[in-house]
Image (spheres, rainbow, N blue to C red):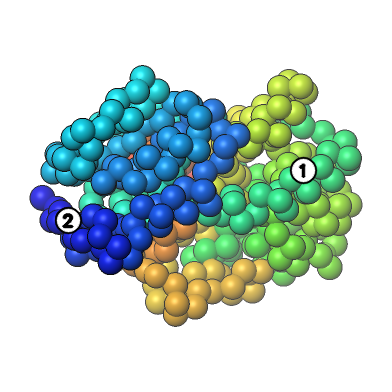
Amino acid sequence: MMEWSLVEAKNGESTLQLNGVTIYSKYRPIDDAKRWIDAECDTKSEEYFMIGLGLGYHLKALVECTQGKRITVYYFEQQELKLFLLQYSNETWWQQEHIKIVHDLKNASINADIQILIPNVWLQAIGEKHPLFNILDIIRNNQIAYKKNAKLMAINFKENMKLCDQSQFTVSTRRVACLVAAGPSLDETIYWLKEQQCNVDIYVVGAALKKLLKLNIVPIAVVISDAKDLIVEQVSNTSYTGELYYLSTANHQAVKMHTGKRYILFQQGYHLAEKESERRKSPLIETGGSVGTTTFSLLQLLGYETIILFGQDLGFVGRQSHAMYATSTNLTYKEHMRTVVSNNGCKINTTSNLYAFLHWYNEKMKSIKIKVYNTAKMGAKINNVPFINREEFFDIVKK
C-alpha cells in the first residue's frame, strides 16, 4: 500500500502527497497543474491517455483544453479514487461519456494517435520498486527524446526523401547474421569476427564501424538512426563503401556522406514515415528506440534464421558503457544507474535508456522464431537468448 495524504497549499487549495512526494504545487496546485497540461498537451492528438488521477487537477485542465476528445486516466489505488471522488462529490464535469477513469492497463488502447501524458512527479512518488515504474519510465523517456528532436527529425526526413534512395530490399541467401553494436564486450569478441568474417554477414551500428575497419573487418552493411549531427563522425573519413541502411529521420549529412549503396528505412510510429511507407508499398520497421534494436528488426526483415549479438551489452561494469575506439562516449557520474543481471549471473550497471532497449528485447523474444545468441558475457541477460562462447560461436557458423 502507498501512503496518500491531503495537505493544504499556501493559497488554501488542497494538494496531495504520495509517499512523501508532493504531487502538485504547495502554493497554487490547480494553476500548477494547468500550466503543465498547457505545456505538454498536443491539441492535434485525437485521444489522450494520462497516468495519475490524484485530485483530478491535471484531468480537469486536460478536459478544458481538448474540447470533447476522448480521455482515459489511470489511477494507482482505490484510496486515490476515493480522494478524487471526495474532492468532486458535488460536481459532474468528469462524468461525461468521453472521459474514462480506469485501474486496469490491460485493456487500455494505445496507438500513434493517442498522446500519453505522464507527469514526472508520479514516477518520483511511486518509486522504482513499483511494478509499473520501468514501463512508465521508458514511455516518458521516449517522449522526452522525441519532443527534443522532433524538428530535426522532420528536417532530416524532408532532405533524405530528396535522395530517392531505395526502400525495398531482398531476403538474404545466408542464414547467419552478426549484429555488431558498440558495447564493451566487443573489445574481446571482435577477434572472433575477424576470424569468421568470410562466413557470416556482419551488420554494424555506426558507432562501431571504425572499430571494425581498424582491424580490417569489412561489414556487409552499416546502420544509422540518430537524427543528431554527432553521428557524422561515425561515417566520416572512412573508405567504407558497403551498404548503408538508415532511418528516414537519420542525420542527413551523415547519410549524404556515404558513397556506397543506400537503403532508407521507414519506421513505425513516425507519421511521415508511415505515410511514405504506405505510398511506396515498402516495409515498416520497428525501431525499439536504438540503432541496435533497429538493426535487429532489419535482420528479421532480411530473413536471417540465426542472429548473433556482438557488443549489444545493454549494461556494463563500472562506467565503461562502450568499447574502446567506438565513436560514442562513456557515461558521466551524473548518470542515474540501476542494476540488472548479466549473462554470467553477476549484477551490472545499466541506465534507463539501456534498460528500455533490454525491455524491448525481452518482449521481442517472447514470440520470435529466429535463433538468437548473445556473446556479451558481462552484458545484460536477455530472456530466451543463450550466451555463447568463442567455441560455440565457431560451431554455429560451421553448421
Q: Is residue 283 left or right of residue 341?
A: right
Q: Amino acid at mark 1?
A: Phe
- From what the image shows, is residue 192 above or below residue 179? below
Q: For this rendering, which residue is in front, 17 or 349?
A: 17
Task: Estimate the x, y position of residue 208 in percent, counting from the top left.
Answer: 64, 62
Reply above or below: 128 against 142. below
335 in relation to 297, above or below: below
Q: Residue at x 35, y 43 (%)?
A: 51
232 left or right of 142? Answer: right
Q: Position of residue 224 (x, y in %)?
A: 69, 52
Residue type highlighted by circle 2: Leu
Q: Estimate how packed mark 1 is, as few (under 14), some (14 to 19) or many (20 or more) residues with alpha carbons within 10 Å.
A: many
Residue assigned mark 2? 6
- Can the viewer see residue 90 in this picture? yes
Nearer the observer: mark 2 or 1; the answer is: 2
- SS at mark 2 in the image: strand
Mark 2 → mark 1, Cα distance in angstroms: 48 Å
Q: Residue at x 60, y 34 (%)?
A: 44
Residue to which mark 1 is pinned: 157
